[in-house]
């Protein structure tokens, strides 16, 4: 007979913390904890409480420490929480650090086969008979370690009051309805709950209570969203080379495109994907495809982007539409390949030799990754230039609560392409680089057009308006200035910044990308202490007039970013007219997503100075 | 005075319709001969110039596409990266004929990686390497195909053993590999025709002398050395299907290779008894020729049945770049379903 949960006594005196805490699960990578962690995350989400998960993992396949941080927040805060309320310690090697990291009054669950001394008296201890409980489920030998992780899922479910049916739902989703693994994992969870009911005397100070705050939202990561956005954007061609943390974006295309992009009549694929031999080849193929009239995309991260630099110059100069997703990780060099950063802002904006500058879209939410996925393809063809989409590991690979993906509101924009019938109507000579409309965007034809006047010779060398080789100084200068006009003309076409104003604010914050969650949370905390700040989230480079107005309207603007040198700050400083506003760089990089605590601390220090 | 008639091919075009800009290569450059044979081959094969895409890298060789077929799309890209550009471009419309022109520096040095991978993928592309053993545009440095011991004006002697492009192509599993010589235009033209009709990569390594920097009589890439050391493996002719008048050879005298589109290559046996259908035999033949100091030319390896890159994709009849917008964007209902399962 199960022992009744303590209703009175010590446990009930402490006030319960409901739906506002963080869990840190420390495991060894390669031990299959991801299934357990996502199951917990999804179950809590299904109970209607906003939740986010961050995987802090090593660049390794098996054996190194990894942490999964789940933040439960009825306030909707999704940034990395600095404070840990509940720890699940499954890794002997990090056991002591994990114990130390736990906040006073926290809950410490640990595998009971770890023989480390425990020297804290200000936390609640809960040893878990992980091995015994896993064995009882009689799993195949090779799965024993994997399903052992379900023990902590079950005990947490008991302690936090997570509903069993939501856990089952989450497992169903994870295993795509395959009953074998669902039953096996669920049986371990059930055993663990039974054990906890019978044996645990402990009452958790942290509880989950059902809410309805996740209605109308989805749970997804930015790379899947970017891949789907690309598919709905009508991409024809993707070439890529594996690199963390970009890989999962093309992999999302490989997963979803076969079901979504078959011609309904012929059942043939309306796209092609090639895994290239390196990033030089992946961008080269994409440029070839873009030249030939295909909507083409590649995805990479810092080291791969460096390799693409020469080709980016070529695409810029020859005016070929391509889309390059940059999922940032920590550099320089190999750096911390599995950790997040915003350190490739400068490289992306200026990628290439000679005078190059690129349009960069910067999504800050998972939903925006979808939106910019299709929008980037439209902009590339409209402007006939490379479009970069700058995301990062935190946004790309972690699970975020986001509004559902919205179907594109505007039809596919192929830009100025001339086919045979269009050329028939042109009486004069057609010139590839003639600025006929005065908008600096010329007309283009693509290989496959069989009209005798269709062909032109694309080249990385100097050319005149008709694409003929030219070294004439005036041809060079006019062409390069037209490219600049074209770039300038992009400003009003790009996603506008998102501005959140606070009544009584004097100063402002500018941030971009994945730091949005931390900035919003910090703004709330700062406001509570009387520091009110307006907030502008940049969504594209080059900036538009709203950004300049925001800076002009605030005597002091903090530019917050996850890198060492304040790269966005330097770009804004360069582009800024002579305003009296003070632009203050607040940047920080240590491999982790920025926390609201850090932002609050540094802004407060500035405000007091 | 009699009216001068200009000769036309079967699609009503003259040789003029296949020409490009006037060459700016040196007088006597081997590459001009290659350009001439590409023009002749395409004219004789009745190929509409608009059906051809020309792609090149960087170097003297890679300037060549400017000098033929103005009415074809062309792209002069990056050094060593012609294969990637060609791969992407040809996916746009797989009915296009790709002609890639590269050099020995472009292919065997900076572009070795892309070269090996494009052969492995068997992209339908005529891949011509204008091979002169020297960097011309930067004025006379050794290339990776320069023979060991070659002496050049400012460089001294070449220390290293050369890369054999044919060997590399065969090892890279290219499905059509040939070697020719700018000084042997008839053979070169027949190989170009066969290469265009081959469904897959057709690598032709053309020894194409640089008259300015590497044409010393004893240099392996000179006219004089080529003329005196060339050993043709066979007399090669290309037979289009419409003209399939049976050419009779004595049994055992010739070998006929059928290509996927019904055209044929006929290899008339000369002194060597060589069948270009076995990779191991090809390597052996190349080693022996090397030992004898011979420049063997002809079709060195062919496998007309190897699947091309496009055979590995389930592409529609309509070229991808002509698909209507409706075919490119999935329905709103499908997105609603995706949103349902995103958690």
Image (tube, coloured by chain):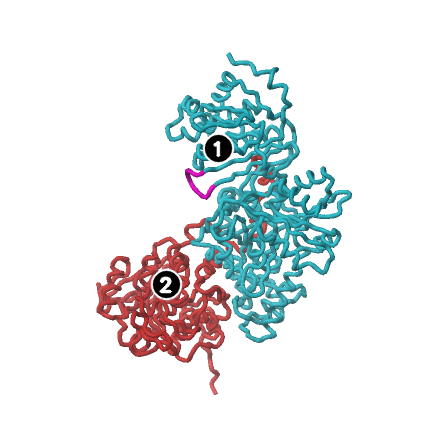
Q: CA distance from mark 2 to mark 1?
A: 62 Å
* Figure disc tally: 2
Specify whether residue A264 is in view.
Answer: no
Residue B289, given in percent of the width and then of the height, sits at: 24, 67
- Image: A71 above or below B211: above
Left or right side of A410 for A253: left
The residue labelled by disc 1 is A96
- Report the chain shown in cyan: A
User: Contact, CB < 8 Å: mark 2 with mark 1?
Assistant: no
Subunit that carries the residue with mark 2: B
Find numbered disc 2 in the image and state the secondary structure of the residue it sits on.
strand
Q: Nearer the viewer, residue B103 or A272?
A: B103
Residue A519, given in percent of the width and then of the height, sits at: 65, 43
- Image: B276 above or below A204: below
Judge whether residue B103 is colored magenta: no
Mark 1 surroundings: few (<14), some (14-19) or many (≥20) residues within 10 A: some
Which residue is pictured at 56% across the width and 71% down the height? Answer: A463
Q: Nearer the viewer, mark 2 or mark 1?
A: 1
The boundaries of the magenta stretch are A58-64
Left or right side of B311 for A226: right
The residue labelled by disc 2 is B203
Majority secondary structure of magenta residues: loop
Which residue is pictured at 47% across the width and 32% down the height? Answer: A95
Left or right side of A365 for A93: left
Chain B, chosen colour in render: red
Marker disc for residue A579: none
């Amino acid at each position: 007979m199960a022992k009744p949960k303590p209703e009175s006594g010590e446990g009930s005196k402490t006030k319960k913390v409901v739906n506002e805490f963080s869990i840190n699960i420390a495991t060894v990578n390669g031990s299959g904890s991801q299934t357990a962690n996502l199951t917990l995350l999804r179950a809590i989400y299904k109970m209607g409480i906003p939740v986010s998960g961050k995987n802090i993992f090593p660049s390794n396949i098996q054996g190194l420490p990894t942490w999964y941080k789940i933040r439960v927040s009825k306030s909707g805060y999704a940034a990395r929480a600095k404070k840990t309320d509940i720890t699940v310690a499954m890794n002997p090697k990090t056991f002591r650090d994990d114990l130390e990291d736990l906040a006073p009054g926290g809950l410490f669950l640990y595998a009971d086969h770890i023989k480390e001394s425990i020297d804290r008296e200000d936390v609640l201890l809960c040893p878990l008979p992980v091995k015994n409980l896993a064995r009882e489920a009689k799993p195949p030998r090779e799965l024993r370690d994997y399903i052992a992780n379900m023990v902590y899922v079950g005990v947490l479910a008991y302690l936090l009051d997570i509903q069993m049916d939501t856990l089952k739902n989450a497992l169903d989703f994870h295993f795509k309805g395959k009953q074998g693994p669902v039953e096996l994992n669920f049986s371990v969870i059930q055993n663990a709950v039974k054990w906890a009911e019978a044996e645990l005397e402990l009452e958790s100070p942290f509880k989950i209570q059902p809410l309805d705050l996740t209605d109308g939202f989805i749970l997804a990561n930015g790379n899947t969203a970017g891949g789907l956005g690309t598919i709905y954007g009508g991409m024809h061609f993707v070439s890529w080379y594996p690199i963390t943390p970009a890989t999962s974006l093309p992999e999302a295309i490989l997963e979803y495109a076969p079901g979504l992009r078959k011609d309904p009549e012929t059942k043939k694929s309306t796209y092609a994907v090639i895994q290239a031999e390196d990033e030089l080849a992946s961008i080269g193929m994409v440029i070839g495809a873009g030249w030939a009239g295909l909507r083409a995309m590649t995805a990479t991260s810092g080291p791969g982007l460096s390799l693409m630099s020469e080709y980016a110059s070529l695409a810029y100069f020859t005016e070929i539409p391509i889309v390059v997703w940059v999922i940032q990780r920590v550099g320089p060099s190999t750096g911390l390949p599995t950790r997040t950063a915003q350190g490739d802002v400068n490289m992306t904006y200026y990628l290439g030799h000679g005078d190059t500058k690129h349009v960069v879209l910067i999504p800050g939410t998972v939903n925006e990754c979808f939106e910019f996925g299709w929008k980037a393809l439209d902009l590339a063809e409209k402007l006939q230039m490379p479009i970069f989409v700058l995301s990062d590991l935190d946004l790309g690979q972690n699970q975020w609560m986001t509004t559902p993906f919205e179907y594109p509101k505007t039809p596919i924009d192929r830009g100025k392409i001339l086919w045979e019938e269009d050329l028939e109507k042109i009486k004069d000579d057609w010139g590839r680089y003639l600025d006929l409309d005065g908008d600096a965007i010329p007309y283009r034809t693509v290989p496959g057009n069989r009209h005798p006047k269709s062909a032109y010779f694309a080249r990385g060398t100097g050319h005149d308006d008709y694409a003929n080789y030219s070294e004439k100084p005036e041809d060079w200068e006019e062409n390069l200035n037209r490219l600049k006009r074209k770039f300038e003309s992009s400003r009003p076409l790009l996603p506008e910044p998102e501005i959140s104003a606070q009544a009584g604010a004097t100063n402002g914050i500018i941030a971009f990308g994945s730091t949005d969650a931390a900035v919003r949370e910090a703004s709330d905390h700062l406001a509570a202490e009387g520091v009110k700040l307006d907030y502008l989230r940049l969504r594209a480079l080059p900036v538009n007039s709203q950004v300049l107005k925001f800076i002009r309207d605030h005597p002091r603007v903090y530019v917050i970013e996850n890198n060492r040198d304040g790269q966005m700050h330097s770009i804004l400083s360069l582009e800024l007219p002579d305003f009296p506003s003070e632009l203050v760089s607040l940047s920080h990089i240590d491999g982790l997503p920025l926390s609201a605590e850090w932002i609050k601390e540094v802004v407060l220090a500035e405000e007091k100075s | 005075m009699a009216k001068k008639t200009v000769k036309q091919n079967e699609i009503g075009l003259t040789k003029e319709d296949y020409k490009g800009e006037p060459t700016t290569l040196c007088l006597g450059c081997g590459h001009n001969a290659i350009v001439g044979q590409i023009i002749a081959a395409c004219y004789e094969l009745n190929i509409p110039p608009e059906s051809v895409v020309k792609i090149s890298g960087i170097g003297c060789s890679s300037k060549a596409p400017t000098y033929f077929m103005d009415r074809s799309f062309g792209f002069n890209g990056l050094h060593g990266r012609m294969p990637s550009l060609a791969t992407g471009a040809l996916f746009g419309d797989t009915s296009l004929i790709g002609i890639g022109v590269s050099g020995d520096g472009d292919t065997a040095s900076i572009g070795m990686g892309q070269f090996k991978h494009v052969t492995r993928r068997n992209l339908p592309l005529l891949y011509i390497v204008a091979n002169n053993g020297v960097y011309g545009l930067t004025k006379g440095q050794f290339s990776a195909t320069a023979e060991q011991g070659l002496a050049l004006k400012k460089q001294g002697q070449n220390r290293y053993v050369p890369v054999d492009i044919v060997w590399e192509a065969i090892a890279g599993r290219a499905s059509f590999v040939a070697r020719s010589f700018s000084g042997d235009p008839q053979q070169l033209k027949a190989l170009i025709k066969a290469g265009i009709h081959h469904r897959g990569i057709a690598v032709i390594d053309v020894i194409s002398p640089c008259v300015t920097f590497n044409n010393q009589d004893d240099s392996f890439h000179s006219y004089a050395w080529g003329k005196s050391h060339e050993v043709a493996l066979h007399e090669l002719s290309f037979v289009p299907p419409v003209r399939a008048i049976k050419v009779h050879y004595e049994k055992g005298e010739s070998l006929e290779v059928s290509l996927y589109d019904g055209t044929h290559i006929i290899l008339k046996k000369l002194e060597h008894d060589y069948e270009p259908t076995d990779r191991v035999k090809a390597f052996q033949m190349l080693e022996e020729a090397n030992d004898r100091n011979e420049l063997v030319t002809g079709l060195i390896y062919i496998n007309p049945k190897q699947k091309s890159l496009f055979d590995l994709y389930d592409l529609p009849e309509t070229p991808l770049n002509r698909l209507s917008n409706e075919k490119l964007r999935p329905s709103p209902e499908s997105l609603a379903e995706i949103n349902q399962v995103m958690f």
